[in-house]
Structure formats: structure tokens, C-alpha cells
């Protein structure tokens, strides 16, 4: 009887944690605002935890990744509170962390938190254990342990080069010269944080990737110098003595906006404006790619806010979609958006090719595999290798069958991409892992519901 109760409870959970979509979205003409930028929300919390005094943020993304970051700084002795419209962090200064014994930091599903926080713990006098959920525990952490070890910190893995791990800092940190050639903003940022705690000058030759950390450093007048190259940036960072408080109105996340951009492009007679979006040049790969494919996008009302470029994005339905041989140089600027870009390629008039995508499989799940799997279920032909995919587009693609998406890997982008596919191409879909959106975009379904009203 006890086993039966467990089985029934599991069935009820799985049913509650899935959605059904039976028809395409009707045409729409809307103005929306999406959630605050996840990368900036996490970085604001980390910088504010090091600042002197009270920092405030509005539009902080209240996702699981960001809440995990909030909990992490609280574990390190920093007081922080979330009120109705803002978050307040009471910084204790650059050396204000309390390194108690037996500290455990749970990064949950957040690779950004897990990797960046290690750079800030580089001088901890006591061992600190870092853990994460099943998905994060399958991701490579040796890529950040390797450079941080060169500073003088000591790491201990259980068995593999994944979480859980522990870090023991050093009082005698040495600056390093490091080549970051993966295009990983997480690794680059963690090394910058470590350099901020180290006497001397740390030098990073970094393959082009997101530069939110560098922009915040410059905005805060920290001792960082950046020389931009064609494919690599040369970054020099010296020890930081003080960080001033940071009041921030977090702009909207382009990775969240991307789902609605693609939904609009694939829907008939529709138009959408997404307000106050962060269009940092290292993040707009999706805009560049969609424009190459013939999607109608305009950037309006541009402005600079604390070093970041902000704008409204206008997008209209596209009757004809061109295939793309996607330049690999655009990969880092669109790495979180490729799943949704693949849907656009599915309706292109020809064959699209995406290459050098090995970093796509270093995310919450092997996303290149999942992209191909979703397309196959939709009836789209693909040829996939370990780091590339060819998509044979069909401009007349319509789905008239049942499709079930079960990943149970808690990958929010697999879930949201599947939802957009269902609303764009039709068919009867059952999509599991609804709770996964709490990781990055808790009100995703709520915004979709508002878009479907009065249309």
C-alpha cells in the first residue's frame, strides 16, 4: 500500500509539472517587458556583497539561480533582504566575508554562481564546500579549478572533476597570466574576481565572450584595463581595496526576450515590442543571426546605463526565412539562444549549418543533442555531430501529431523552446519539467498567457 501511495504521488507530481498545448497562438500585436537580466542580477549581488554600505536593486530577477546567489552571500555573513519592489544588500566591505568553519554553499543549478563564487573564496582560511543539483554536478569544474589553483588556492574533488568540491584559500596569493580560450565568461569572471583579491597584476588573454563583469568593474572605477582585439581581449586586473555601493535598475534579459522574438517571427501577421532589453554587444548574437535569416528586427530608443547598452526591440512576422551558414564567431554571443534559433532554421527555405558548438553541451543539459531531438520529433531532418548540426528547413512545416517532451534534466531552455515550438508549428504537445523555468524565467508562462489575451 505504501508503494502504491508513492507511485500515485509521483504520477500526480509529473502531471502537475507538465503542460499541454493543442493549438498555435493567434496573431498578436503586443508590448511586453520580460524579467531582469540573470547575468547582471547574479553579478550585482556578488559585487554588492563586497561593497561598502547599502546597495539597492530594482527588477532583480527572482529566479532560483539568483536566489541561490542571495543565499550564498548570506552564508558568508552578508545581510540581504528582498522587499516588494527591490533587493537590498548590506555590504561589509571588500574583505567583509565571514569564513566560518564547515561552510557549505549550494549553487543549485547555477553555473554562473558556482564558478564566479570560487574566485571570491580564493583567500578563505577555512575549507568551503561547493555543491549543486544533479545537472550542475555533471558540468565541468576543472576548467575553473585549473586557473584558480595557479593563484595558490587548494581544491579537492570527491571523485571526478565535478561538484561537489572544496576550496581552501591562501594568504599568499600570486597573480597569474592565463589564456582563456573557450570563450567562457564564467571562467574569465572568476579569474577577474580572484585577481581582485591578489597583490600584483593578473593578466588574462580571453577569447571573446560576455563582458558584464568588466563593464561593472569599469563603472565602479576598479583597477582594470582592457585592450580589445579581434578575437581575444587582454585584461589586466590589480588588487581592489574598496568597492562603492551599487544602486541598479536591472535591465531585461535578452535570453528571455529571445523566446518571444522567435515566437513573433514564426507567427502570422504578428508584431511585438520588448522594452528595456540589455543589448550588450557580447549578447546580441541572436539579433545578428535572425537578421541574416531575414527576420524583421529594429532596435529603438538606445541608451547607455551603467556601461550597458539598453534598448527596445521591435520584431515582426516574417513570410520568408533564409537559411544560414552561421559564422562561428557569433557563437559566444548566442550560446544560450541556439535551441530557439534552431526553430527558426526549421522553417527556413534551405539548409542551415551551425558549427563549433561544443560549448552548447556544457550547459544544464547536452543542448545540441536536445535541439536535434526536438527537431526530429517535429519531423525536421538534421545531421548532427558532437559539435555541429545541419537543419533541413521546411517553409511549409505544420505539425499534426502528438509530441511528448520528457527531459527531467531540469533544463529551462529545453522546456521553453518546446513551448515556443508548439505555439509556432501546431500539433498536440505534452511538455514536462514546467518547474524548470524557476531557474531563469519564473513568469515565462504568465507573459505568454497575457500575449494570448484579446487576440
Image: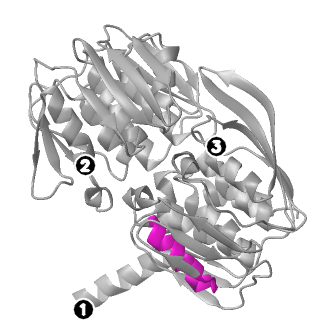
Q: Residue at x 66, y 37 (%)?
A: 279
Q: Secondary structure at mark 3?
A: loop
- Residue that label 1 marks: 1
Residue 66, placed above or below residue 301: below
Which quadrant of the view contains residue 366?
A: bottom left
Residue 74 visible (yes or no): no
How many badges with numbers are in the image? 3
Decide which of 106, 309 is in the foreground and name it: 309
Q: Nearer the viewer, mark 1 or mark 2?
A: 2
Left or right? Give the position of 393 relative to 40.
right
What is the C-alpha distance between the residues marked 1 and 2? 43 Å
Expressed as whole percent of the image width and height from the top left, the position of residue 108 reads 33, 51
The numbered disc on residue 141 is: 2
* Main secondary structure type of the part rendered in magenta: helix
Q: Secondary structure at mark 1?
A: loop
Expressed as whole percent of the image width and height from the top left, the position of residue 10 reads 36, 80
What is the C-alpha distance between the residues marked 3 and 1? 55 Å
Q: Is tag 3's residue or tag 1's residue first in the polypeptide sequence?
A: 1
Which stretch is magenta? 367-381
The numbered disc on residue 284 is: 3
Left or right? Give the position of 119 relative to 340.
left
Q: Residues within 10 Å of mark 3 (few under 14, many from 20)?
A: some
Quarter of the image where the N terminus is located: bottom left
Amino acid at each position: 500500500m505504501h508503494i502504491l501511495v508513492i507511485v500515485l504521488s509521483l504520477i500526480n507530481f509529473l502531471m502537475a509539472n507538465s503542460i499541454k498545448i493543442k493549438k498555435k497562438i493567434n496573431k498578436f500585436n503586443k508590448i511586453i517587458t520580460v524579467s531582469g537580466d540573470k547575468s547582471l542580477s547574479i553579478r550585482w549581488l556578488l559585487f554588492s556583497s563586497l561593497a561598502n554600505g547599502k546597495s539597492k536593486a530594482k527588477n532583480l530577477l527572482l529566479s532560483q539561480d539568483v536566489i541561490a546567489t542571495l543565499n550564498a552571500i548570506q552564508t558568508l555573513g552578508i545581510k540581504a533582504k528582498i522587499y516588494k519592489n527591490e533587493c537590498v544588500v548590506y555590504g561589509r566591505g571588500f574583505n567583509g566575508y565571514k569564513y566560518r568553519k564547515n561552510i557549505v554553499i549550494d549553487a543549485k543549478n547555477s553555473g554562473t554562481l558556482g564558478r564566479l563564487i570560487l574566485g571570491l573564496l580564493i583567500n578563505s582560511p577555512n575549507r568551503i564546500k561547493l555543491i549543486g543539483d544533479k545537472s550542475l554536478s555533471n558540468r565541468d569544474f576543472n576548467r575553473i579549478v585549473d586557473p584558480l589553483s595557479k593563484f595558490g588556492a587548494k581544491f579537492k574533488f570527491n571523485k571526478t572533476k565535478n561538484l561537489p568540491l572544496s576550496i581552501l584559500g591562501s594568504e599568499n596569493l600570486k597573480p597569474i597570466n592565463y589564456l582563456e580560450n573557450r570563450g567562457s565568461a564564467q571562467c574569465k569572471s572568476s579569474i577577474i574576481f580572484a585577481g581582485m583579491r591578489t597583490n600584483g597584476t593578473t593578466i588574462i588573454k580571453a577569447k571573446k565572450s560576455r563582458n558584464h563583469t568588466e563593464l561593472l568593474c569599469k563603472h565602479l572605477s576598479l583597477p582594470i584595463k582592457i585592450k580589445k582585439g579581434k578575437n581575444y581581449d587582454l585584461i589586466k586586473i590589480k588588487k581592489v581595496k574598496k568597492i562603492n555601493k551599487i544602486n541598479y535598475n536591472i535591465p531585461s534579459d535578452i535570453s528571455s526576450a529571445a523566446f518571444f522574438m522567435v515566437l513573433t517571427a514564426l507567427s502570422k501577421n504578428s508584431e511585438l515590442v520588448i522594452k528595456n532589453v540589455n543589448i550588450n554587444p557580447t549578447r546580441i548574437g541572436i539579433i545578428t543571426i535572425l537578421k541574416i535569416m531575414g527576420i524583421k528586427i529594429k532596435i529603438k530608443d538606445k541608451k547607455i546605463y551603467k556601461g550597458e547598452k539598453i534598448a527596445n526591440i521591435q520584431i515582426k512576422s516574417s513570410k520568408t526565412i533564409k537559411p544560414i551558414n552561421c559564422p562561428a564567431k557569433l557563437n559566444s554571443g548566442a550560446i544560450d539562444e541556439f535551441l530557439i534559433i534552431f526553430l527558426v532554421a526549421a522553417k527556413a527555405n534551405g539548409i542551415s549549418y551551425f558549427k563549433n558548438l561544443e560549448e552548447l553541451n556544457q550547459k544544464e543539459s547536452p543542448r545540441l543533442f536536445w535541439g536535434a531531438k526536438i527537431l526530429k520529433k517535429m519531423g525536421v531532418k538534421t545531421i548532427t555531430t558532437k559539435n555541429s548540426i545541419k537543419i533541413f528547413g521546411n517553409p511549409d512545416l505544420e505539425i499534426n501529431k502528438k509530441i511528448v517532451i520528457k527531459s527531467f534534466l531540469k533544463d529551462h531552455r529545453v522546456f521553453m523552446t518546446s513551448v515556443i515550438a508548439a505555439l509556432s508549428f501546431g500539433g498536440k504537445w505534452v511538455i514536462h519539467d514546467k518547474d524548470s523555468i524557476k531557474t531563469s524565467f519564473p513568469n515565462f508562462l504568465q507573459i505568454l498567457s497575457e500575449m494570448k489575451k484579446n487576440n
